Amino acid sequence: QVQLVESGGGLVQAGGSLRLSCAASGSIFSLNVMGWYRQAPGKARELVAEITSGGSTNYADSVKGRFTISRDKGKNTAYMEMNSLKPEDTDVYYCNLRTGYGHEYWGQGTQVTVSS
């Protein structure tokens, strides 16, 4: 079993920055993808950014150039630096880990609120 613990959400003014962290523990296979998704009430969860164990990244078009995802493999931790935040970035952000064996795990979610 894998546990994901998120931290770093909060309230920030438009144009500001936040850094999210996701620490994974448990039986983690070396080949995996860690990422961040977000979900607004009544809407589907959407991918924000993801990073493979090899360091390849993928971003939603809406955050390209503003968000940067990274990971510390030794600590099994993923980070997402969010800059130039906009009110439309307000959502609950969920950490995700999926393995090459088809297992998928989610964190509990952290609220990000951007005021205008």
Image: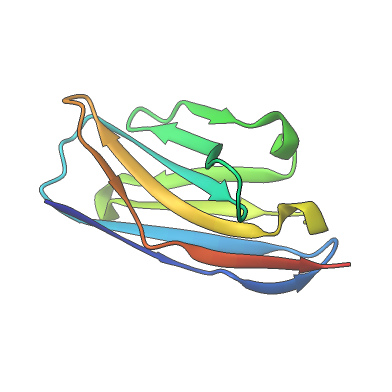
Percent coordinates x, y for residue 7 in the rendering: 45, 69
Left or right relative to 53: residue 15: right
Residue closer to the observer: 35 or 105:
105
Identified at 58% across, 62% down, the residue is 19
- Most extreme residue toward the right is 116
- Most extreme residue toward the front is 42
Residue 84 visible in the current orientation: no
- The scheme the figure's colours follow is rainbow
Identified at 78% across, 52% down, the residue is 88
Depicted 52 relative to depicted 8: above or below = above
- Which quadrant of the rendered structure holds the C terminus? bottom right
Percent coordinates x, y for residue 8 in the rendering: 53, 69
Identified at 63% across, 65% down, the residue is 112
Depicted 99 relative to depicted 28: above or below = above
Percent coordinates x, y for residue 5 in the rendering: 33, 64
Left or right relative to 5: residue 110: right
Percent coordinates x, y for residue 109 in the rendering: 45, 61
Q: How many marks?
A: 0
The image quarter containing residue 64 is top right
Depicted 86 relative to depicted 70: above or below = below
Residue 3 visible in the current orientation: yes
Left or right relative to 57: residue 10: right
Identified at 21% across, 24% down, the residue is 100
Residue closer to the observer: 114 or 23:
114
